[in-house]
Amino acid sequence: MIEFSNVSKVYPNGTQALKNVSLSVQKGEFVFVVGSSGAGKSTLIKTLLREEKPTSGTVFVNGYNLGRMKRRHVPRFRRSLGVVFQDFRLIDNMSVYDNVAFSLRVTNVVGKEIRKRVPYVLNLLGLASKAKCLPHQISGGEQQRVALARALVNNPAIIIADEPTGNIDPELSFEIVDLLAEINAQAGTTIVMVTHEHELVSYFNKRVITIESGVVLSDSMSGCASELFTGEQLMENYSKGLSSKQKAADFSDRNAPTLLSVQSLPHQGDGSQAFPRSAHKNVAGGKL
Amino acid sequence: MKPHNFMYLFKEGARNLFANKLMSFACIGVLVACLLLIGGATLFSLNVSSIVQYWEQQNVVVAFLSEKVGPSDVDALELTLSNMDNIIETQFVSKEETLERSKEQTYEEYAGIFDGLEEDNPLLDSFVLRLKDPSIIEDTVAQLRSTEGIFKVNAVTDVAHILSGLKRTVSVAGMAIVVILVAVSVVIITNTIKITVFNRRKEINIMRYVGATDAFIRMPFLVEGMLIGVLSAVFAFFLLGFGYTYLLEWVKTNYTEQLPIIYNNAISFWDIAPKVFAGFSGLGVFIGVAGSGVFVRKYLKV
């Protein structure tokens, strides 16, 4: 489904964002991609979306060779994907319904089919009552669900989610990832989700690919990120990024409770009490 | 592109025009202002040309007939003259009329010097000729001189040349002003369009991500550009038409005595209206469509 072989990416300014990355994702997998900022996650996603071409190596997604693809074939390729972004990227002056319908109009779907599929997907994600609202009239979590509905309505083989929970409340974050997991389980849609929320990663216990400085540091099926991302390391990395004015001690005092709670996060199983699961159980019932 | 898609994209373009009311209003406002300036400059230069041309035609050539030409030959000669390329009007003035006019134009106390000339008039019959193109007055004069039956030709060549020069200067300067205004307008309008497109770069970006083709993205912008162009042309056309007509009317009522030459020779707006409208809508649509097309391309790169 997704196949990176020896992929390197060097930007014109000399930054080497990916170094000889090889990885493959099979149909129906759910993969988290983690890594600190600047590690190359964004470049990986951009390469997946054919926003950037690899400098060397080959990328196959959905049977398309992205390195060799012509510009005019890009739209067709992107229609086989669903994309969800951190900042939702909904069109502000279109209603929820139109935002979702939009991705069907783009693909030459006839009006009759649009009128059938859009309400279905909105219903599935519990957005039926919000269909006529504009994006700014609904909450962040709802906006992200609209974005997810838009990604889903084309019935894509792969959904790529670039930090989909970055802009929403932790509780709602779980709801969103839960939805993705249900889509993955019910429809067999391959899901690649970039995140740096470690609670989510450890909670959902899926395959985790860790990227650091442009190389794949670890690729584990256990739901654990690389050693680098245990609580202690995380705090260390975090302090490194602080401005020199602020004393590290001062910082760790203030942030200790938060980081401790990261460390003491319940793993799967007992997590269901700690984090309420999605209220939208109807996802399980619907066929995608 | 399928028909249902085309309709959708057209509607989308029209919808965007209303959805982005403020920017559309700004675009139309700027475009109307530019078209008015261009139209105003064009009308001004056309009118100046028309007035100068009128003056030019007041500059007449007088051809005196030799005494050998009898009354019977006058008609034949007149026909010869009026067949000349550069002569648009001929008027025969007999020597009796010339004498009458001379008397009238002379101070009363000296009128007596013409007494007794009626019986043996020493003056000559003449033709007063108007020229089509006074800039080649010398050629015409030469041609007249070589014509049989013409004794002498009087022509003020200097005035003719000054007026021709003036007319040429006015039309060249007018043209230059119009060209400069068009260039300035294009810069202002493309900037305005650039802002509208920039405001919607996010939208364009999203369209690219959900797999919209370039043509699909560009189409509503082109429709929008076209609508802005047409609307601006219509507004500018009527504003210019009524404004100009009103101005002429005002000059006519307030300055009848002083400036008859202006409104007598002013161009009527409605005579050139089809040309003005074609020019306006052509320019408006071209700028709207080209501007949108160029700037949308910039955001199609993702």
Image: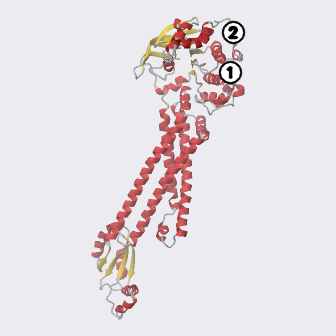
Reply above or below: B246 against A192.
below
Give the foreground label among 1 and 2: 2
Label 2's element?
Answer: helix
Residue B159 shows up from this direction: yes
Residue A64 or residue A271, whichever sits in front: A271
Say which residue appears at 48% left-offset and 42% top-offset.
B190
Reply above or below: B116 against A12.
below
Judge from the rendering whether residue A82 lies leftward or rightward of residue B65; answer left or right: right
Judge from the rendering whether residue A240 lies leftward or rightward of residue B159; answer left or right: right
Q: Position of residue A153 (x, y in %)?
A: 63, 23
**Mark linked to residue B37:** none
CA gap between label 1 and label 2 equals 21 Å
Residue pointed to by mark 2: A272
Residue B278 shows up from this direction: no
Residue pointed to by mark 1: A125
Reply above or below: A182 against B53.
above
Judge from the rendering whether residue A222 lies leftward or rightward of residue A287; answer left or right: left
Where on the picture, by quarter, is residue B69? bottom left
Residue B301 or residue B201, whichever sits in front: B201
Residue B158 or residue A24, whichever sits in front: B158
Q: Position of residue A283 (x, y in %)?
A: 69, 17
Whether callout 1 and callout 2 share a subunit is answered yes
Q: Earlier in the sequence, mark 1 or mark 2?
A: 1
- At label 1, counting other C-alpha atoms closer than 10 Å, the crowd grade (few under 14, some 14-19, many 20 or more) is many
Q: Position of residue A188 (x, y in %)?
A: 62, 13
Q: Position of residue B170 (x, y in %)?
A: 39, 60
Mark 2 falls within which chain? A
Q: Amino acid at mark 1?
A: Leu
Q: Amino acid at mark 2?
A: Ser
- At label 2, counting other C-alpha atoms closer than 10 Å, the crowd grade (few under 14, some 14-19, many 20 or more) is few
Mark 1 falls within which chain? A
